[in-house]
């Protein structure tokens, strides 16, 4: 497990960070890789900070510990930036994605001098527009897939369509909104990646 | 054809239970094992199994009902964790002494206090003298494989004892990982039908279960029970050999990972064994001769076999995910040391207590422990013989 991808999710109990990590494990599994998706529980209550993790690798994964030097960090709740050191151990060549309405420039001072790639996604607004409720985990999952390149865009949407079809078998009316949320978040990251490319060219 | 999938450790055990389709499951929910009875209930509601589920009012009742059902002649199981197992304590001894081959899915969690929901082996180790077979799993795959092997071991007429299949709470029970599942038909054929020779609901051959025994006979009953547990060692190996034929996966009393030429060996159980194996690969790449002995079968305790596997190394780190509060080390520390002494294997044996109440155990911890063993051997550095890993000072 030397060249695998390690991801750390920060969220609050009830926001679905754990579910997003498990869904990402599902998606990566479909690409034929070895996967791990697991939560770290503190006190079990709504709103408490929680952490979840993913390991994705072409080799068998044997390590069963938390992740201390992630390649990617996903922050599902921006209020955690004030209380949790979200960039702790994050590799400089890695990236962090934050659910916030702030711009990259506005959020940088809150990242303890992190020098790597920073992406912002307004998952709350996307979720309100597409689902009428604040479920930030779907857009953040799409952002994590877009940044990490775990799976190509169209293949990812196809997988998620099937996954939601299964997950929301009893409330199919939310599937379309969730799919729309995924696409909007994916677009935000693709635009940011495109802008980076143009800047470096 | 085996099916490649991904699922959590709890899902893997529930999946095995569906394939086995046992007769009776009394259960009471407790974190982190709750999902197992929950998922089995769904299988029952969907008509995928015809198991009789008994929602009981406590774990004391769960084990009591399990013993009753098993005595009646039904293939029975339950699942629990932590305080749930503690509440079963009296019945655990009854299940074993009445020779009930029932199965228990134990999802290891610490006991209070301070109150905590996370993994350590305090629950399983607390039941170490109850007469149950105890098998520990490294990951979801092993939890599944061990559960499929549970009844063929327990129901073997030379054994006829209850069996506990253990996995680490949250670390594997709630972690989604890759897994290879057997076909339903393959599992059904492997486990077979339960055909007890003697059972309560057999009017043609009445028996008594759990009667009073005078002192003149009770001691012989205990010895018979002890012999049955000793017999289990060979049966576990036979069942593992049969299981390898249908799964391609090899199991023993323990897994000796790169121990053949190792100077330093870490003896460890459960999910942390995977972390230790990764660390061993990293250290081997630096030329260090290190290995891991992952104990799978804790009861019956393979004392001779462990001593034999360790006899050529210079030092062993005995890893306990529990405390015994005796001032002299924990369960594995004491039992492995006794096994080494009795078999005249005179190597250094340091007892490390790690991962209590979910404290994370990392590859870096493993590097440090191997380094400490090596420094003691090469430079005569003093090592605390019974110590805690990663303790806040």
Image: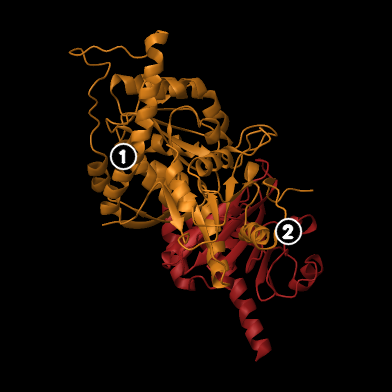
* Label 2 CA crowd tier, 10 Å (few <14, some 14–19, many 20+): some
Residue B391 visible within the image: yes
In which quadrant of the rendered view does residue B329 lie? Answer: top right
Judge from the rendering whether residue B158 lies leftward or rightward of residue A120; answer left or right: left
Chain drawn in red: A
State which chain disc 1 sits on: B
Dot 2 corresponds to which residue? A78
Label annotation for residue B340: none
Q: CA distance from mark 1 to mark 2?
A: 56 Å
The foreground one among A97 and A91 is A91
**Residue contact at pointers 1 and 2, CB within 8 angstroms:** no
Residue at left 72%, top 57%?
A: B381
State which chain disc 2 sits on: A
- Farthest left residue in view: B204
Judge from the rendering whether residue A152 lies leftward or rightward of residue B235; answer left or right: right
* Label 1 CA crowd tier, 10 Å (few <14, some 14–19, many 20+): some
Residue at left 80%, top 71%?
A: A113
Residue at left 69%, top 46%?
A: B388
In which quadrant of the rendered view does residue B121 lie? Answer: top right
Closer to the observer: label 1 or label 2? Answer: 1
Dot 1 corresponds to which residue? B235
**Residues flagged by tags 1 and 2 on a common chain:** no
The foreground one among A89 and B46 is A89
Judge from the rendering whether residue B49 lies leftward or rightward of residue A54; answer left or right: left
Q: Position of residue B234 (x, y in %)?
A: 32, 41
Q: Colour of chain B?
A: orange
């Amino acid at each position: 497990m030397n060249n695998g991808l390690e991801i750390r999710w920060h969220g609050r109990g009830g926001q679905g960070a754990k579910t997003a990590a498990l869904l990402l494990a599902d998606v990566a599994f479909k690409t034929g890789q070895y996967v791990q998706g697991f939560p770290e529980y503190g006190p079990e209550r709504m709103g408490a900070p929680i952490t979840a993790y993913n390991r994705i690798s072409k080799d068998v994964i044997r390590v069963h510990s938390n992740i201390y030097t992630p390649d990617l960090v996903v922050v599902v709740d921006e209020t955690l930036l004030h209380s949790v050191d979200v960039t702790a151990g994050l590799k400089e060549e890695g990236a962090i994605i934050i659910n916030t309405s702030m711009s990259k420039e506005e959020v940088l001072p809150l990242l303890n001098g992190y020098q790597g790639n920073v992406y912002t996604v307004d998952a709350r607004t996307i979720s309100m527009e597409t689902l009428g409720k604040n479920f930030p985990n779907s857009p953040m999952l799409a952002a994590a897939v877009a940044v990490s390149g775990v799976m190509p865009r169209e293949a990812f949407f196809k997988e998620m369509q099937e996954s939601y079809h299964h997950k929301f078998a009893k409330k199919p009316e939310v599937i379309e909104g969730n799919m729309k949320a995924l696409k909007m978040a994916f677009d935000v990251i693709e635009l940011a990646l495109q802008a980076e490319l143009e800047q470096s060219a | 054809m085996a099916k490649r999938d991904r699922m959590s450790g709890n899902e893997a055990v529930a999946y095995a239970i569906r394939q086995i389709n046992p007769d009776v499951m009394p259960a009471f929910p407790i974190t982190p094992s709750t999902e197992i009875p929950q998922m089995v209930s769904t299988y029952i509601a969907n008509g995928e199994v015809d198991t009789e589920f008994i929602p009981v009012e406590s774990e004391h009742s769960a084990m009591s009902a399990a013993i009753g059902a098993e005595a009646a002649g039904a293939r029975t199981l339950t699942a629990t964790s932590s305080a749930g197992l503690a509440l079963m304590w009296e019945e655990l001894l009854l299940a074993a002494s009445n020779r009930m081959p029932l199965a228990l899915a134990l999802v290891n969690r610490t006991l209070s206090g301070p109150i905590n929901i996370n993994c350590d082996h305090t629950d399983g180790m607390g039941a170490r003298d109850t007469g149950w077979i105890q098998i520990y799993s490294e990951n979801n795959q092993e939890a599944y494989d061990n559960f499929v092997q549970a009844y063929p071991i327990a129901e073997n007429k030379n054994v006829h004892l209850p069996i506990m299949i253990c996995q680490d709470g949250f670390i594997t029970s709630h972690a989604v990982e890759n897994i290879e599942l057997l076909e339903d038909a393959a599992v059904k054929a492997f486990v077979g039908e339960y055909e007890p020779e003697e059972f309560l609901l057999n009017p043609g051959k009445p028996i008594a279960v759990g009667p009073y025994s005078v002192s003149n006979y009770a001691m012989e009953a205990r010895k018979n029970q002890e012999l049955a547990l000793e017999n289990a060692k060979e049966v576990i190996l036979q069942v593992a050999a049969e299981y390898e034929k249908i799964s391609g996966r090899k199991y023993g009393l323990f897994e000796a990972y790169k121990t053949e030429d190792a100077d330093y060996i870490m003896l460890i159980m459960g999910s942390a064994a995977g972390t230790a194996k990764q660390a061993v690969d990293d250290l081997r790449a630096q030329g260090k001769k290190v290995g891991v002995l992952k104990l799978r079968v804790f009861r019956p305790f393979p004392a001779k076999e462990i001593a034999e596997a360790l006899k050529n190394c210079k030092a062993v780190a005995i890893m306990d995910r529990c405390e015994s509060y005796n001032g002299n080390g924990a369960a594995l520390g004491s039992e492995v040391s006794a096994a080494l002494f009795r078999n005249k294997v005179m190597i250094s044996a340091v007892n490390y207590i790690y991962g209590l109440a979910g404290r994370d155990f990392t590859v870096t911890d493993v590097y440090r422990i191997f380094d400490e063993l090596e420094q003691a051997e090469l430079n005569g550095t003093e090592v605390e013989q019974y110590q805690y890993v990663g303790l806040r000072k």
